[in-house]
Image (cartoon, grey):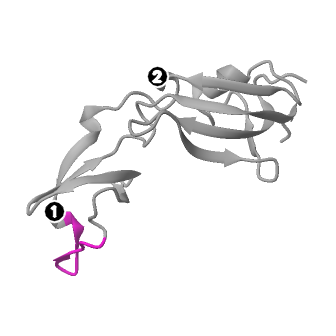
Amino acid sequence: MQINDKKVVTVSYNLHANLPSTDKQHIETADKSHPLSFIFGVGMMIPGFEKNLEGKSNGDSFDFSIEPEHAYGESDETAVVKLPIDIFKKDDVIDFEILKVGNILPMSDNEGNVMNGKVMAFDQSSVTMDFNHPLAGHWLHFSGEVLGVRDATK
């Protein structure tokens, strides 16, 4: 059975990304003991991942790279924002334990939507946060094997 719309796909893989500090950095692994299963064609996975798996069958190996626009997009300058430092107060005191450059903090917008932001910098009045996906702007490289393809059930 080939991978196409509404099929349940199970894969093992290694993900590497081209990050500024290295040529390729290992990001994650889904091995045969803890594979990834998903329904193909319903938006669960990044578009470039699905495009490169389409038509493959059980037992097929894969090895492909995805450009940023077909993965997590390019970095968006408007997703880097300055927030008032007062919102990081806990009991009227700034919580400097969480305000460390590089920390990823769960935040929510005015409508209650949760998003993760990375602390980029802070001073006495503001905190600069980056709300881009951590892999935005980076090429992704997947290698692995298709472990199963089947029809989805209710």
Classify residue 74 as left or right of residue 1.
left
Would you say residue 88 sits in the magenta stretch? yes
Task: Identify which residue is drawn at 74% across, 26% down.
Answer: 62
Q: Nearer the viewer, residue 9 or 103?
A: 103
Graded by Cα atoms within 10 Å as few (under 14), some (14 to 19) or many (20 or more), the crowding at tag 2 reads some
- Residue at the spot 36% in from the left edge and 40% down from the top edge: 132
Residue at 88% x, 30% y is: 59
Residue under numbered circle 2: 69
Q: Is residue 56 above or below residue 124?
A: above
Q: In the figure, 39 relative to 47: above or below?
A: below
Judge whether residue 52 is colored magenta: no
Residue 85's mark? Answer: 1
* Residue 91 or residue 96, whichever sits in front: 96
Give the left or right position of residue 104, taking residue 33 as reference.
left
Rendering quarter of residue 14: top right
The quadrant of the rendering that contains the N terminus is top right
Which amino acid type is shown beneath numbered disc 2? Glu
Q: Say what amino acid the circle numbered 1 marks.
A: Ile
In this orientation, which residue lies closer to the viewer: 40 or 132?
132
Q: Position of residue 101 (x, y in %)?
A: 28, 58
Task: Specify the segment rendered in magenta.
Answer: 87-97
Q: Is residue 91 left or right of residue 14?
A: left
**Residue 10 percent coordinates (x, y):** 80, 39
Q: Quadrant of residue 136?
A: top left
Q: CA distance from mark 2 to mark 1?
A: 33 Å
The quadrant of the picture occupied by the C terminus is top right
Mark 2 or mark 1: which comes first in sequence?
Answer: 2
In the image, 55 versus 107, the foreground residue is: 55
Q: Is the Cβ of the residue at disc 2 closer than 8 Å to that at disc 1?
A: no
Place of residue 55 in the rendered image (x, y in percent of width and height, measured from the top left): 79, 18
Please state if 70 lies on the left or on the right of 151 as rendered. Answer: left
Packing grade of label 1 (10 A; few <14, some 14-19, many >=20) is: some
